[in-house]
Image (tube, rainbow, N blue to C red):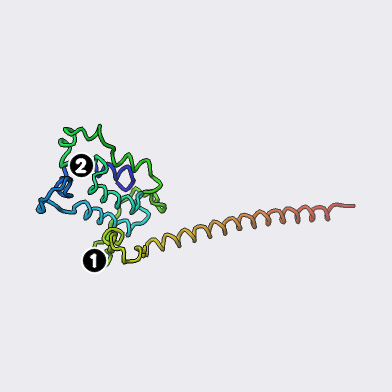
């Protein structure tokens, strides 16, 4: 589920197919039932975002996909998040009359792909200590125009950048070592030929 397609399957299975009440939770159609309204999807996405901070190379998708998912659950632009259950969507013909959110995502992969992603099949174990939690400024401060744009202060991303620079430097040094070995082999061969020539009788 850490790939983009896996994430799509997860959302469709656990939220759409299992009957998350999008219409009631996000007040679609002017619903005024405040007891039913709740930003559950945003809270879940925040949990995933926290894990992307702790494991910045483990997820194929980036913050933009999570933010887009939350926004589209509210604005009703795609049929994926309409009504309160799958049966209501079928009765309304949503699949025939609207576009899927995931069709939009899969045609704009560059926008939603994590450039630091490294395929890792193993398990990840996130830290749950409050000291390891970050405020998701891009979500919770998105409407605060008086504040400066959110800055990415994730230490892990800094380490990833440093690791990339070190990897590039190592590659350069390995190339120099190969070149020096080749030059050394040529010199040894040349010295051997010159030495052999000096021993031959004139």
Asked whether 51 or 77 is in front, the reply is 77
Element under disc 2: loop
Left or right of residue 165, residue 30 in this image: left
Q: Please tell me which residue is depicted at 44% across the width and 60% down the height of the picture.
A: 161
In this rendering, the label closer to the viewer, 2 or 1: 2
Q: From this view, report whether residue 5 is shown above or below residue 42.
A: above
Left or right of residue 193, residue 183 in this image: left
Tell me if mark 2 has few (under 14), some (14-19) or many (20+) residues whose alpha carbon lies within 10 angstroms of its own. many
Asked whether 49 or 80 is in front, the reply is 80
Q: From this view, report whether residue 2 is shown above or below residue 91.
A: below
Residue to which mark 1 is pinned: 130
Q: From this view, report whether residue 141 is shown above or below residue 99.
A: below
Cα distance in 3D space between marks 2 and 1: 34 Å
Asked whether 6 or 68 is in front, the reply is 68
Residue to which mark 2 is pinned: 82
Percent across and percent down for residue 106 are: 35, 41
Judged from this view, the residue extending furthest toward the front is 30
Tell me which numbered mark, 2 or 1, is placed earlier along the sequence.
Answer: 2
Asked which quadrant contains residue 18, the reply is top left
Q: Please tell me which residue is depicted at 23% across the width and 47% down the height of the picture.
A: 73
Q: Please tell me which residue is depicted at 16% across the width and 49% down the height of the picture.
A: 27
Left or right of residue 47, residue 184 in this image: right
Percent across and percent down for residue 143 are: 28, 60
Percent across and percent down for residue 99 are: 29, 37
């Amino acid at each position: 589920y850490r790939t983009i397609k896996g994430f799509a399957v997860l959302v469709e299975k656990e939220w759409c197919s299992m009957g998350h009440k999008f219409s009631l939770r996000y007040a679609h159609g002017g619903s005024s039932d405040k007891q039913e309204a709740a930003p559950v999807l945003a809270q879940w996405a925040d949990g995933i975002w926290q894990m992307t901070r702790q494991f910045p190379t483990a997820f194929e998708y980036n913050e933009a996909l999570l933010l887009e998912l939350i926004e589209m659950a509210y604005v009703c632009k795609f049929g994926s998040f309409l009504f309160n259950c799958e049966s209501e969507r079928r009765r309304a013909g949503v699949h025939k009359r609207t576009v899927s959110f995931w069709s939009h995502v899969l045609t704009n992969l560059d926008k939603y792909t994590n450039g630091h992603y490294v395929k890792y099949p193993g398990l990840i174990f996130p830290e749950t200590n409050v000291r390891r939690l970050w405020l998701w400024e891009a979500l919770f401060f998105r409407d605060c125009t008086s504040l400066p744009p959110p800055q990415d202060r994730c230490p892990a991303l800094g380490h990833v950048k440093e690791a990339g620079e070190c990897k590039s430097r190592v590659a350069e040094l390995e190339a120099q070592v190969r070149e020096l070995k080749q030059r050394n082999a040529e010199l040894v061969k040349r010295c051997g030929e010159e030495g052999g020539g000096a021993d031959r009788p004139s």
